Amino acid sequence: METLQQSGANEIKQVKEELEKRIHKDVEKITQQADSDKKDMKQTLQNEHALALEKLRDELTSSHNTVLEQSKVNAATQLQSLRNNLTAAAEVSMEDALSKTANAQQLEIAQVNSEAESRKVALKEEWNSSHEKSLDLLKQMFELDKSKLKEAIEK
């Protein structure tokens, strides 16, 4: 009877040890998988961030080029307008026309410069805002994935 109890106790002990080994192996596998998933997610987030920044840069570059082209067209139009004004003023008085044209050019140049600076500031603000939104989104995604990983590990 005593041998039977001892044999049963040994079997229980052996089963318990095997279960502990299995649990330990499963925990190691889950930990390794979580680490791997974390690395994959980090790389994915970095790739998505890089793509988002590249897309934003391309959009801003395109917008900037459009603004520059518009500025060139406006400058050409204004230059033609100034030439027309100069020709008309030449009939009245060459000195008076030169003075008026110079003043008009200075005003128009100041206006064009002011518009270009306003556009530049607006584009810079849009860039900063988009960049901040992108970073905030990436932080939120990271925190969400981090909490999911914690839940998975706890389970």
Image: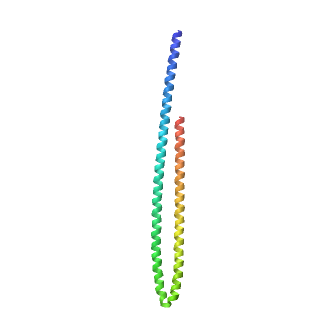
Q: Give the image location of residue 146, x and y in percent.
A: 53, 42
| Image height of 27 relative to 72, above or below | above
Which residue is at a point 52% across and 63% down the rendered structure image? Answer: 123
| Image height of 52 relative to 61, above or below | above
Q: Give the image location of residue 110, x and y in percent.
A: 54, 75
Q: Give the image location of residue 140, x and y in percent.
A: 54, 48
| Image height of 9 relative to 90, above or below | above
Which residue is at a point 48% across and 44% down the rendered structure image? Answer: 41
Which residue is at a point 50% across and 35% down the rendered structure image? Answer: 31
How is this picture coloured? Answer: rainbow
- In the image, 96 versus 84, the foreground residue is 96
Which residue is at a point 48% across and 27% down the rendered structure image? Answer: 22
Q: Give the image location of residue 39, x and y in percent.
A: 48, 42
| Image height of 8 relative to 117, above or below | above
- Count of numbered tags: 0
Q: Which residue reaches farthest top?
A: 1
